[in-house]
């Protein structure tokens, strides 16, 4: 077990290294020049070239990548914080420490001052949504799957398909039209500040969470339903029914645990979706989250921020994968990790 | 201020007004440009025409206190002298740092930091006097030295300010002894004394050639007067002469301004201004207004119009403008280096339907010369009509008998501009011009807008058409995105800039407009009316054609 986790952690570090290098390489080929974007279209070419040089963007790709790794691990000081460059890049934590993600050229702040707050906002949105998606999907999925073809199954399935096939930007606008414009019950955007219109923070979460839950649980319900229906057709279920157990006991004791194995992975994958896939919802509700930040950073070519965001998203993905493998072993005694 | 009779230009204007050659609005606009105060100009207009002069409505007492919340894109604001946007960035710094003059929504230019100004009859020497009660936020008084520092800074080509496009013809010359990086002669002040400090509160422009629009140039959004200590940088805590201080700023999120005690213009009515970024999605702003999280937007998009007009607690504000999106072709790039191709692009366009589709008719048709009927010097040319046969013939003559394939770069941050391109592309198809649309996020487009061969660029309103011409079409101007260069055009423009007689000036304009129609680098289907919506609680607001928001003008009534 320990070896298994150790191996997976090593794999995680390897994945992060490869992915971070790929991000560096890909941004190399994306259009636009960060120095030009920082100074604006009308700055003289000389000032742009000078800034380009100051940002050490002239160096070759491997040199820059290794330097970025060095800064991240605290082996070398961040060269951009050198006051002689007059870039005005100041990090209260100092220029050399472990976990130094560098300086965001878009926000003009240390990446560590930008990213955690945004990630926290998105984690909150994702956490609330996840806490609703899981129980809702399990309940409706099992209810639909235990009697395949019944009226209840048909109703839940149709609802699930509809919910999942309406994109978030459409359901967002739809919900705003009903609850904000017509009924005036909820705020239309979620800037996470109080004051404007007197809406509480809690009320600002209702609509973004509703959009995510509708979109995502529709899909997970279908997965749970499919898996439950398959298990319900197994011979051991028939045996259990024939030996006189009540239908409730059969479903609860025999079917659910076995039916959970496949959906378990799917459910954990939703965490990844909720961390970096919520960008559409964040745009519709002007929510100051991680997805919107990553989009803006990518458009600007803010490599330090893109790298940091990629590493965080990957770390989340790899961790949930590890959890799902461990969970598998718990659900299915036939699987042994190691 | 000099008596109007001393100034032959004002006498000319007065004569034209009495002969009904110009209307009262034009008279006021030009008279104020020449230094007559707006009140005096309105009064004089009344005397000349015999019409009763309606006194300006007494500033109504506005409610005090509260925080006004405005939707705005929170972009980088660090360098006001090199802003390229105006719509977003200058509406933030504008609350803190101020301008020498103030052009109102009707086109009349008023005193602001400059209390008065006079021009010599040859329109070459302009003397400005500063108010003596203006103080920076640290208590230091504003002096002519501060202003001269700002003026010299924006006219230094190394700073890269767009003021150069406006002022180079009358303030700068090429210095063959100095070369810039490309080996071209460097532009320097045409005379060491071109910007002159007269005394502590007076400064002077000694112009190379006559120029009529000096006061209006000083209201261009990059011409904010910054404290020299800040070295051109604007940020939280920067010194300003304005009614507010910037206390909080985060790109992409929020900017907060706090009213300052002892503002020279009288303390602001509201305690705070909060500007919030609702992102690239125009529906988010609608939602925020619907739930009263915002009191208004600095400006609204036509795609938002129907939804916002349906909200009963909002008030519409609109004004006709010279704001437009030009589909401009870089004349140094194939196939647009051939004038016949550029003409064909124009002849294939039918403006009316585009106006309907892109703006729901909220604007007027363009004539492909970037001068709007909202401009005082607008010269009406025969309508430029769609002519497909001619377009095809021109294309064939240019060596494209089977039509033409090209690509247009379009920023996605302006939805109606995108719709305009889509409908133009449909119309071009009829002439065999197949245009591929290359959508780019706004941030990426503004990185390459002066470089792409064919692009869709927004141009905001400027009070005079000659100002736009100086920025966008004069040879070598920094914002000349199409690399257009026409000696005849440049010469006529310089002459127009020195002509106060409106009718004479309109003759120059007719020629300039015709040159752009025949030879110019642009397809320009329409002008829009700018508009926005504000909560009915917001008092004192008026829509400015350039979308400028002034925090000191507004008050917020109780809910």
Image (tube, coloured by chain):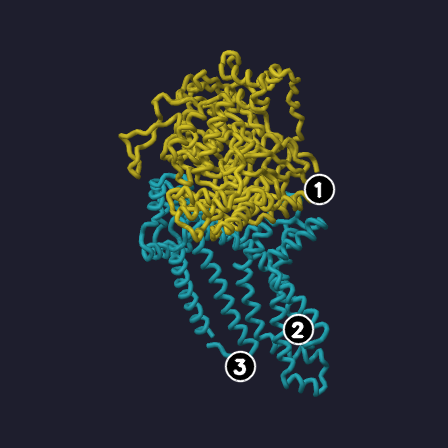
Q: Is residue B194 left or right of residue B266?
A: left
Res B69 seen here? no
Within the image, what quadrant is residue B530 found in? top right
For disc 3, the marked residue is A334
Q: Is residue A266 above or below residue B352?
A: below
Residue B408's place in the image compared with A211, above or below, is: above
Q: Is residue A219 above or below residue B244?
A: below
Q: Position of residue B558 (x, y in %)?
A: 70, 35
Disc 2 is placed on an element classified as helix
From the image, state whether disc 3 or disc 1 is nearer to you.
Answer: 1
Which residue matches tag 2?
Answer: A142
- Residue with the mark numbered 1: B312
Q: Color of chain B here? A: yellow
Q: What percent of the width, then of the height, locates residue A148?
A: 68, 77
Q: CA distance from mark 1 to mark 2?
A: 46 Å
Q: Is residue B272 above or below residue B406?
A: above
- Mark 1 Cα-neighbour bin, 10 Å: few <14, some 14–19, many ≥20: few
Mark 3 / mark 2, whichever is N-terminal: 2
Letter of the chain shown cyan in the rendering: A
Q: Chain of mark 3?
A: A
The tag on residue B418 is none
- Confirm whether residue A324 shows in the render: yes
Q: Mark 1 near mark 2, Cβ–Cβ under 8 Å?
A: no
């Amino acid at each position: 077990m320990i070896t298994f986790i150790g191996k997976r952690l090593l794999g995680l570090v390897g994945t992060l290294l490869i992915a971070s290098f790929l991000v560096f390489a890909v941004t190399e080929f994306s259009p636009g020049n960060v120095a030009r974007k920082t100074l604006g279209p009308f700055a003289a070419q000389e000032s742009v070239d000078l800034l380009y040089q100051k940002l050490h963007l002239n160096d070759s790709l491997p040199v820059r990548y290794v330097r970025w790794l060095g800064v991240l691990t605290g082996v070398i000081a961040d060269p951009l914080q050198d006051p002689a460059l007059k870039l005005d890049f100041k990090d209260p934590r100092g220029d050399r420490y472990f976990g130094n993600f560098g300086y965001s050229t878009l926000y003009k702040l240390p990446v560590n001052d930008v990213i955690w707050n945004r990630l926290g906002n998105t984690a909150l949105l994702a956490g609330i949504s996840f806490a609703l998606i899981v129980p809702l999907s399990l309940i409706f999925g099992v209810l639909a799957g235990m009697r395949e073809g019944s009226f209840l199954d048909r109703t839940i399935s149709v609802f699930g398909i509809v919910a999942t096939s309406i994109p978030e930007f459409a359901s967002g606008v739809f919900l705003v039209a009903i609850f904000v414009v017509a009924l005036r019950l909820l705020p239309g955007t979620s800037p996470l500040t109080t004051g404007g219109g007197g809406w509480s923070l809690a009320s600002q979460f209702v609509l973004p969470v509703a959009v995510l839950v509708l979109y995502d649980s529709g899909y997970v319900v279908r997965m749970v339903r499919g898996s439950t229906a398959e298990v319900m057709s197994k011979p051991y279920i028939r045996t259990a029914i024939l030996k006189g157990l009540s239908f409730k006991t059969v479903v609860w004791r025999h079917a659910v645990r076995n039916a959970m194995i496949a959906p378990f992975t799917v459910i954990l994958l939703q965490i990844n979706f909720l961390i970096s896939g919520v960008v559409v919802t964040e745009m519709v509700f002007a929510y100051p989250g991680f997805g919107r930040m990553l989009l803006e950073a990518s458009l600007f070519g803010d490599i330090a921020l893109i790298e940091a965001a990629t590493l965080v998203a990957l770390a989340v993905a790899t961790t949930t994968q590890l959890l799902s493998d461990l969970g598998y072993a718990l659900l299915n005694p036939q699987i042994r990790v190691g | 201020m000099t008596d109007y009779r001393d100034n032959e230009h004002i006498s000319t204007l007065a004569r034209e007004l009495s002969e009904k050659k110009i209307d009262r609005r034009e008279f006021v606009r030009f008279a104020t440009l020449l230094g007559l105060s707006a009140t005096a100009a309105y009064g004089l207009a009344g005397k000349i025409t015999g019409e009763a002069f309606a006194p300006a409505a007494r500033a109504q007492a506005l409610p005090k206190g509260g925080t006004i919340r405005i939707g705005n894109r929170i972009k980088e604001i660090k360098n006001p002298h090199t802003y390229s946007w105006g719509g977003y960035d200058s509406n933030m710094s504008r609350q803190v740092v101020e301008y020498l003059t103030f052009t109102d929504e009707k086109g009349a230019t008023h005193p602001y930091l400059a209390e008065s100004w006079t021009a010599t009859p040859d329109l070459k020497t302009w003397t400005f006097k500063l108010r003596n009660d203006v103080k920076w936020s640290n208590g230091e008084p504003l002096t002519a030295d501060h202003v001269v520092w700002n003026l010299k800074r924006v006219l230094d080509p190394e700073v890269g300010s767009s003021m150069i496009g406006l002022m180079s013809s009358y303030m700068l010359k090429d210095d063959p002894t100095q070369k810039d990086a490309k080996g071209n002669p460097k532009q320097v002040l045409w005379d060491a004394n071109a910007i002159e400090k007269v005394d502590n509160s007076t400064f002077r422009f000694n112009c190379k050639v006559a120029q009529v629009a000096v006061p209006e140039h000083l209201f261009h959004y990059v011409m904010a007067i910054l404290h020299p200590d800040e070295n051109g940088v604007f940020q939280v805590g920067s010194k300003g002469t304005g009614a507010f201080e910037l206390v909080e700023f985060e790109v992409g999120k929020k900017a907060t301004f706090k009213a300052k005690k002892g503002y020279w213009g009288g303390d602001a009515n509201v305690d705070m201004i909060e500007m919030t970024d609702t992102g690239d999605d125009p529906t988010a702003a609608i939602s925020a207004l619907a739930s009263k999280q915002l009191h208004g937007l600095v400006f609204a998009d036509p795609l938002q119009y129907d939804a916002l007009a349906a909200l009963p607690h909002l008030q519409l504000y609109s004004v006709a403008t010279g704001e437009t999106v030009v589909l401009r072709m870089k004349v140094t790039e194939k196939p647009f280096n051939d004038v016949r191709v550029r003409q064909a692009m124009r002849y294939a366009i039918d403006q009316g339907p585009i106006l309907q589709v892109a703006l729901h008719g909220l604007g007027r048709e363009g004539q492909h010369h970037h001068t709007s009927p909202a401009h005082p010097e607008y010269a009406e040319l025969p309508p430029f009509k769609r002519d497909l046969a001619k377009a095809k013939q021109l294309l064939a003559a240019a060596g494209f008998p089977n039509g033409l394939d090209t690509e247009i770069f379009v920023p996605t941050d302006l939805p109606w501009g995108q719709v305009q391109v889509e409908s133009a592309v449909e119309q071009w198809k009829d002439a065999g011009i197949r245009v591929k649309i290359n959508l780019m996020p706004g941030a990426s487009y503004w990185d390459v807008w002066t470089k792409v061969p064919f692009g869709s660029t927004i141009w905001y309103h400027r009070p005079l058409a000659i100002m736009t011409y100086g920025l966008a079409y004069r040879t070598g101007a920094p914002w000349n995105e199409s690399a257009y260069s026409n000696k005849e055009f440049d010469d006529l423009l310089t002459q127009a800039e020195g002509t106060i007689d409106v009718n004479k000036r309109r003759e120059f304009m007719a020629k300039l407009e015709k040159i752009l129609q025949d030879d110019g680098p642009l397809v320009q289907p329409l002008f829009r009316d700018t508009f926005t919506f504000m909560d009915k609680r917001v008092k004192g607001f008026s829509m400015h054609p350039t979308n400028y928001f002034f925090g000191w003008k507004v008050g917020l009534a109780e809910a």
